[in-house]
Image (cartoon, rainbow, N blue to C red):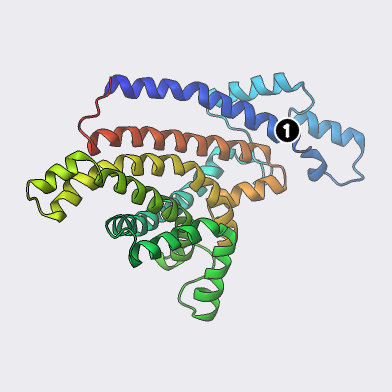
Amino acid sequence: MGVFIVRRILQMIPVLFGVTLIIFFLVRVSGDPVTLLLPEDAPPEQVAQLRESLGLDRPLPEQYARFLRDLLRGDFGTSIRYRGQAALPVVLERLPATLELAAASILVAVLISLPLGILAATRRGRLPDYGATSFAVLGQAMPNFWLGIMLILVFGVHLRWFPVSGRGTTAHLVLPALTLGTALAALLMRLLRSTMLEVLSQDFVRTARAKGLRERVVLFKHAIRNALIAYVTVLGLQVATLMAGAVVTEQVFAWPGIGLLAIQAINIRDMAVVQTVVIVVALIVMVANLLVDLLYALIDPRIQYA
């Protein structure tokens, strides 16, 4: 297990290098931040001075080499919007809000998808199956921003059950978590249904039933445990999608996480903050995938790590 973890951590290094390379050049081809920081009639001397102070007057390969050197020192650059503050603390200050939203969304997705997926598989071709399948189609068809706006109109504006923006209490978390978790719940529910149907048709399940085991034992001890491997795999892979969806959801609900921060940074071309957000999210996704791999051994003891 220890060797496996070390190997996976070493594999993260080239991936992280690729992420830094891509985000560095994408940020720079998106526009010149100097044009936003200075008035249109700024003298060329002032433009040149600012460009030099930001290091933008040097060739891109040299800028990237300096960027990597600073990253290794723990320096992610300086934010333009936050008056010269280091970008990493600015992002880390917002990170708990995004992690809180992501965790709540995963909880919503699991609480919805697990019972619906099992119900649909065990009641195949019946009314519960049709209802759960319809929910899955609707959940994946609705865009996050549209669902968020609808939830705001119904539960925030008309019924006044939940606040429609900001962060503070558990009530603030309900609508954003439902918005972000619904699509994931729909995906997981469909996956669990199909996996359960496949597992229920296998020989070891038929053997368990032939031995006279109660249906509840067959279902929870044998079928669900095997079906959960694919479920957990996809759940881990969806962390990246969840973080991307958080950008839109945080914007809709004014949720003060790194998604909203990234949008604000992109609008004013705050390169250091944008780069830091992407690198931090990439790290979170890689760590999540590593944890998923480790969970396999807990779900199925037959899986061994070399």
Specify whether residue 73 is in view.
no
Rendered residue at 66%/46% (across/down): 265
- Left or right, 57 with respect to 101, comes to right
Residue 304 in the image, given as x and y percentages of width and height:
24, 25
How crowded pointer 1 is (Cα within 10 Å; few <14, some 14-19, many 20+) is rated as some
Secondary structure beneath disc 1? helix
For this orientation, the residue located farthest to the bottom is 158
Q: How many callouts does the rendering have?
A: 1
> Image quarter for residue 135?
bottom left
Tell me the quarter of the image containing the N terminus: top left
Residue 172, image x, y percentages: 46, 66
Which quarter of the figure is the C terminus placed in?
top left
Which residue occupies the extreme left position in the image? 212
Q: Is residue 287 left or right of residue 257?
A: left
Residue 236, image x, y percentages: 40, 40
- Is there any visible trace of residue 208 in the rendered image? yes
Question: Who's the residue at 9% across and 50% down the image?
Answer: 213
Q: Quadrant of residue 57?
A: top right
Q: Is residue 35 above or below residue 217?
A: above
The foreground one among 162 and 158 is 158
166 relative to 218, above or below: below
x 36%, y 56%: residue: 113
Q: Nearer the viewer, residue 229 or 107?
A: 229
Residue at position x 45%, y 38% in the image: 284
Q: Which residue is mark 1?
A: 28
Residue 183 located left or right of residue 70: left
* Residue 221, placed above or below residue 48: below
**Mark 1: amino acid:** Arg
Residue 202, percent from left and from top: 23, 41
Q: Quadrant of residue 287?
A: top left
